[in-house]
Image (cartoon, helix red, strand yellow):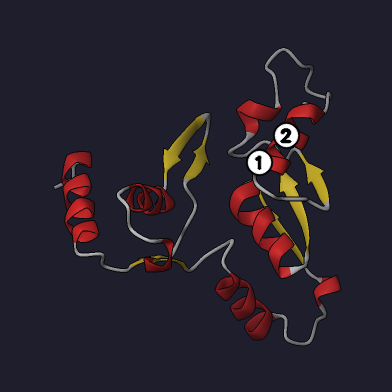
Amino acid sequence: RKTTEGEIASLLAACAQRSLPMLVANPDIVASKGDQLLPMPGSLAVKYKDLGVPLEKIHLLGKPGPAVYNLAKGTFFSDMGKREIIAVGDSLEHDIQGACSFEVDSAFITRGIHCEDLHECEIPEDAWCNEEELEKLCREHNADPTICSEWFGL
């Protein structure tokens, strides 16, 4: 059976009462699916923190945490310098902020989870995103992408 939001909230509250550590393998808060944003495991970490659990008890194992970058560099890119690596993602808070912290270049995909903030429906398809909003979001998330692209593809 499917677990309800109420059951999840009760479980989080019980864990928070005991100040249990939380490991989050995918800290993304939302994911883009078509024109919808769906909650992801990182949203549970946000709720856990809101219940008063200290940040040192909440462990993010994916981006923007350094563990995933160190693992990828050591396992797949050990023969490459950081100047030869680029991280690609649609989340300023996770993908781009993580790349900035790890000091590698990044490509921010604007038509992902931040699409509604950056692109207006009335804009012709060949127009670029709202640059003022892009700058504002980058400041909010302490993220500075090397390049931006509306889409990711070959």
Alpha-carbon neighbours of circle 1 within 10 Å: few (<14), some, or many (≥20)?
Answer: few
Cα–Cα gap, marks 1 and 2: 6 Å
Res 116 → quadrant = top right
**116 up-or-down from 13: above or below:** above
**6 up-or-down from 57: above or below:** above
Residue at point 67%, 56% (across, down): 97
Q: Which mark is residue 136?
A: 2
Residue at point 75%, 38% (across, down): 150
- Could you tell me the amino acid type at mark 2? Lys
Residue at point 73%, 29% (across, down): 133
Dots 1, 2 in contact, CB < 8 A: yes
Element class at badge 2:
helix
Is residue 94 rendered to the left or right of residue 37? Answer: right
In the rendering, at what x and y percent does residue 105 appear?
80, 61
In the rendering, at what x and y percent does residue 93 appear?
60, 49
Alpha-carbon neighbours of circle 2 within 10 Å: few (<14), some, or many (≥20)?
Answer: few
**The residue positioned farthest toward the top in the image shown:** 122
Is residue 139 at all visible to an observer of this figure?
yes
Res 38 → quadrant = top left
In the rendering, at what x and y percent does residue 31 appear?
50, 44
Determine which residue is flagged by label 1.
140
Q: Nearer the viewer, residue 107 or 139?
A: 139
In the rendering, at what x and y percent does residue 27 appear?
47, 57
- Could you tell me the amino acid type at mark 1? Glu
Q: Nearer the viewer, residue 35 or 6?
A: 6
Residue at point 66%, 41% (across, down): 140
